[in-house]
């Protein structure tokens, strides 16, 4: 079952930025921590708006793959000579109303692909909006390239507003509150009816704190991931697990309920057989038959192996 779109601060912020960019032909860059809903929001936006396409740059890192993929998403012929594909794409983007290209995981793009995006922006200025998204690594990559005077990066950043957008607060404590609030909003509309949202979020946070405490020094020493990033990723995983747990069937309880439902019918049938045919089963035998029928039904519900009819006949 797909997750429902929750109106989290990230969802509202990114959606509004995409809407403004597409409506005005402007471009922007969003650099923020992972697993806060950037990708989910971008994909949801594309489904709801014409002439908007989503690109996972981690899957099309090279110049050729990137441009051909964008062309294909817009319905432009992506086969043939690369120069023809590029020219056809530019012509199409300059023709349609307010096109938007969302470049997720943009930090994964190779240098030649970045330069080609700059050229494509120049060719479609004010005709097409571009929106880059990535984690802090994208910001560091661009800034490092600019500091090293690598050709093209300064110009490209200026074309994307000369700044980096961000959703999460800078203060660590405020950021933690932000993540917790987002988790609660997502859980509220996606959790099963009757689920204790506060318990789900609280349970997630308690496990989170213990895990971070155990691993913090190793992670920080390795420079692999920040504490807050760990919290964000584990929060999403934890909520998903809690929701899945809440949806799991208690088969033992279901077995008891089925046997309890069947038992009165078997008792009545036993009385009828005793009166009409003199055949009588003991209470223990009747209870055993009820349990056997319950087990058979549970097995069917689980998709297990079929038993023969004889296996559930009265002994």
Image: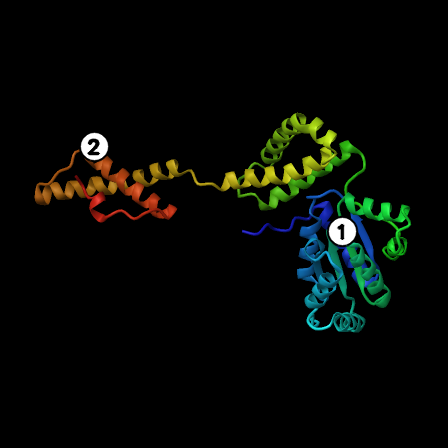
Instruction: Report if residue 180 is visible in the image.
Output: no
Percent across and percent down for residue 162 are 89, 52
Q: Residues within 10 Å of mark 2 (few under 14, many from 20)?
A: few
**In the figure, 211 relative to 159: above or below?**
above
Q: Nearer the viewer, residue 40 or 68?
A: 68
Quadrant in the picture for residue 51: bottom right
Instruction: Report if residue 239 is visible in the image.
Output: yes
Q: Is residue 209 left or right of residue 193?
A: right
Q: Which numbered mark, 1 or 2, is in the foreground of this view?
A: 1
Percent across and percent down for residue 292 are 26, 40
In this figure, what is the number of numbered marks?
Answer: 2
**Does dot 2 land on a helix, a strand or a loop?**
helix
The residue lying furthest to the left in this view is: 278
* Residue drawn at the location 64% of the way across and 37% of the way down: 234
Marks 1 & 2, CB-CB < 8 Å contact: no
Q: Nearer the viewer, residue 72 or 80?
A: 80
Q: Is residue 272 left or right of residue 65?
A: left
Q: Nearer the viewer, residue 276 or 247?
A: 247
Residue position for label 1: 133
* Residue drawn at the location 80% of the way across and 34% of the way down: 171
Q: Is residue 246 left or right of residue 298?
A: right
Percent across and percent down for residue 183 are 65, 40
**Does dot 1 land on a helix, a strand or a loop?**
strand
Q: Residues within 10 Å of mark 1 (few under 14, many from 20)?
A: many
Q: Nearer the viewer, residue 251 or 137?
A: 137
Percent across and percent down for residue 36 are 70, 44
User: Distance from label 1 to label 2 (Cα)?
Assistant: 67 Å
Q: Upstream in the sequence, badge 1 or badge 2?
A: 1
The scheme the figure's colours follow is: rainbow
Residue position for label 2: 284
Please identify the quadrant where the C terminus is shown. top left
* Residue drawn at the location 77% of the way across and 41% of the way down: 168
């Amino acid at each position: 079952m797909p997750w429902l779109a929750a109106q989290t601060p990230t969802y509202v912020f990114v959606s509004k930025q995409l809407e403004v960019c597409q409506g005005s032909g402007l471009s922007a860059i969003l650099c923020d921590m992972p697993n806060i809903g950037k990708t989910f929001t971008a994909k949801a936006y594309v489904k709801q708006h014409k002439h908007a396409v989503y690109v996972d740059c981690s899957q099309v890192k090279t110049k050729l793959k990137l441009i051909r993929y964008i062309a294909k998403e817009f319905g432009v012929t992506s086969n043939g000579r690369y120069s023809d594909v590029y020219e056809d794409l530019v012509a199409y983007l300059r023709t349609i109303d307010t096109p938007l290209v969302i470049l997720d995981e943009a930090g994964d793009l190779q240098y030649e692909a970045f330069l080609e995006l700059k050229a494509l922006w120049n060719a479609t200025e004010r005709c097409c909006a571009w929106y880059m998204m990535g984690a802090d690594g994208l910001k560091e990559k661009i800034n490092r390239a600019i500091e090293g005077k690598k050709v093209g990066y300064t110009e490209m950043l200026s074309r994307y507003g000369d700044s980096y957008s961000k959703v999460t607060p800078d203060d660590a404590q405020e950021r933690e509150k932000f993540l917790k609030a987002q988790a609660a909003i997502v859980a509220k509309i996606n959790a099963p009816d009757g689920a204790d949202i506060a318990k789900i979020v609280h349970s997630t946070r308690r496990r989170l704190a213990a895990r971070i405490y155990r691993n913090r020094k190793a992670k920080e020493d390795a420079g692999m991931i920040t504490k807050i990033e760990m919290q964000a990723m584990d929060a999403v995983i934890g909520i998903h697990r809690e929701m899945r747990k809440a949806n799991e069937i208690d088969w033992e309880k279901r077995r008891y309920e089925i046997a309890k439902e069947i038992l009165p019918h078997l008792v009545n049938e036993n009385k009828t057989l005793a009166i009409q045919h003199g055949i009588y089963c003991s209470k223990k035998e009747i209870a055993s038959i009820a349990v056997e029928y319950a087990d058979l039904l549970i097995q069917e519900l689980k998709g297990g192996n079929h038993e023969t009819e004889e296996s559930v006949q009265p002994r």
